[in-house]
Structure formats: structure tokens, C-alpha cells
Image: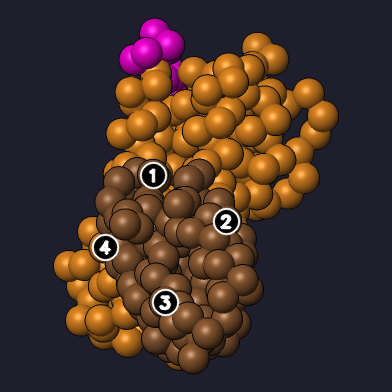
Chain colours: A brown, B orange
Amino acid sequence: MVTAMGRTAPVLSVLVMLASAGAPTHAVTVPPVTVTVTIDQVAFREKSVSAHVGDTIEWVNKDIFDHTATAKNGAFNVDIPAGKKARIVLKRAGEIDYFCEYHPNMTARVVVAKAPQNQP
Amino acid sequence: MSSKIASVIVAVGLLSGAVLAQGAKPTDPQIAHIAYTAGSIDIEAAKQALQMSKNADVRAFAEQMVKDHEAVNKQALALCKKLNVTPEDNDTSKSLAAAAKAKRDQLAKLSGAVFDKAYIENEVTYHKTVNGALGSVLIPSAQNAELKSLLETGLKIFQGHQQHAEMAASMVK
């Protein structure tokens, strides 16, 4: 039902939340989503994004230069070649500041919340 | 010739990082030549480092310099072709090239960790100087919007290189 792209997923999450508010005894599964961060003009376009544990973060590099997404706390270190995409699955909650190893003036943040709890 | 005087003033500014006099404005064909030359110089420096260095951090940095500066220069040439601009050699480009050759000859006499340190420290200084010139002279002087935009992207890339070089410099000490 949920496609790889994240746009439909937040809407679905809201629907799921609404549904669960009306029927709290039903089991609810919130599917993981993909959050996209675009790299363009030597910058991470989305300076800060929010996601949950289990979600995927995908970087789309529109530059003619290779970049990396390197977490300051070591949570991830991803090569994103020029014109390519790269993705990781977020494993742990926390605020993760990251930068490009080759161009450390490129910085951004991903705020990872705990995975949404299934209702009993 | 006022443009020659301007070029000389730019050359002094590029090489010393000094603040330039008002009105020292290179033309777009000159700016294109200066920017291309500055990139080529760093590619040559990186190739020298790849020949001479065994340090993994230094080699990784040098490989990145080759890739990034080649990418920028390729775009610069494509833009010149599109705009029908022929890059025009000038005193600033000549001064840069002469200074770079002197630096390469100096570095060629070194080896091992001494070379690594000298190369990376020069990369910090060189990017700082070029970034200063881009920000204070080349970008403000550029008339064509696409050239200005490419120079602005170049500045962000080279500022990144400067920071990367500073980090690498702290590792080879």
C-alpha cells in the first residue's frame, strides 16, 4: 500500500492515528516511510528532517560532485556519488548532526524519534 | 591600459590576499580564465601529491581535489562554449601559474611526512587565497549571471576544500 516514496506515508500515518483514536483496541501498524534529503548547489536542501526508527533516509545528489553524509556520532557514513542516490535505515533514536566529509561546510540534521508504538 | 593595471592589481590581491582597490574589475573572459587556471593548478598539485605521498588521508584528499576541480572546470568550459566566450589569458592567470610552478618545484624536493605536511598546508593557504579572490573580486565582477552562479557554486565547493584541508592538516602533524 505504501510506496517507497514518503509523501503518501505521513498522510497514511495520520489516517492510522485517526482510526486508532476511534478504535483504540485494534492493533495498528505504522509502516516505515522514506524521508528524502536533496543535495544541490553544495548544500543539503533540507537542513533538518524528522523521522522514526525504522524509517529510511534517502539522499538524492543532484550535484556534479561526490558527497557523503557522515554522522558526527558515527551512526552512519554514506557515500553519495555525483548524480546518484544513497539510503540508510535509521536504527536508533536521537538527534544526529551530519556533514559531508569532502565539504565539511555542508551540514544538516536528522531527528530520529522512537518507532511508533503499536496499540494493544 | 586600465584593464592591464586592473589585472595586475587583481594578481596582487590573489597572491597576497590583500583587499583590492575599488574599480579593479576583470572582464568575464578574464574571470573565466583565472577560475579555470586556479582549478588546473590545484589538479596539478593533487597529481603531484598522488605521485609522491603514501599517506592515505593525503591521497584521499588529493583524489577528491582532482575530481571536484575537474568537474568545475568541465562545467566552466561548457559554459564558455555555450556563451561563446573565449577565456582570455591575463596577468593574474600568469602570476598564479608562475607561483604554482615555483611551489611545485619546491615541494618536489621534499618527501615523506615533510612533503605531506607541506602539501596540505599549501592547500589550506591556496584555497583560502582563491576563496578570498572569488568572494571579493571575481564573483562581484562577473557580469554574466550563469558565470556568477558557477563561481558561487565553486566558492562553496572550495570553502569545503579549505575546511577539509584544515582537518587533513591536523591529521598529518
| Closest to the observer, A88 or B12 | A88
- Seen in the picture, residue B43 relative to B21 is either above or below; the reply is below
SS at badge 1: loop
Q: Which residue in the protein does label 1 denote?
A: A62
- Seen in the picture, residue A44 relative to B56 is either above or below; the reply is above
Determine crowd level at label 1: few under 14, some 14-19, many 20+ residues with C-alpha closer than 10 A: some
Q: Which residue in the protein does label 2 denote?
A: A46
For the view shown, which residue lies furthest in the right direction? B22
Contact flag, marks 2 and 4 (Cβ < 8 Å): no
Residue A9, by quadrant, is bottom left
Separation of residues labelled 2 and 4 (CA atoms) = 28 Å
Which SS does the magenta portion mostly show?
loop
Q: Which residues are magenta?
A: B81-90
- Seen in the picture, residue A7 relative to A68 is either above or below; the reply is above
- The amino acid type, in three-letter code, at marker 2 is Glu
Q: Which residue in the protein does label 3 denote?
A: A29
Q: Which residue in the protein does label 4 denote?
A: B63
Contact flag, marks 2 and 1 (Cβ < 8 Å): no
- The amino acid type, in three-letter code, at marker 3 is Thr
Quick check: B122 left or right of B25?
left
Residue B44 screen position, x and y as percent: 29, 52
Sequence-earlier tag: 2 or 1: 2
On whether disc 2 and disc 4 are found on a single subunit, the reply is no
Residue B79 screen position, x and y as percent: 39, 21
What residue is shown at x 44% (from left), y 28% (from top)?
Answer: B33
Contact flag, marks 1 and 4 (Cβ < 8 Å): no
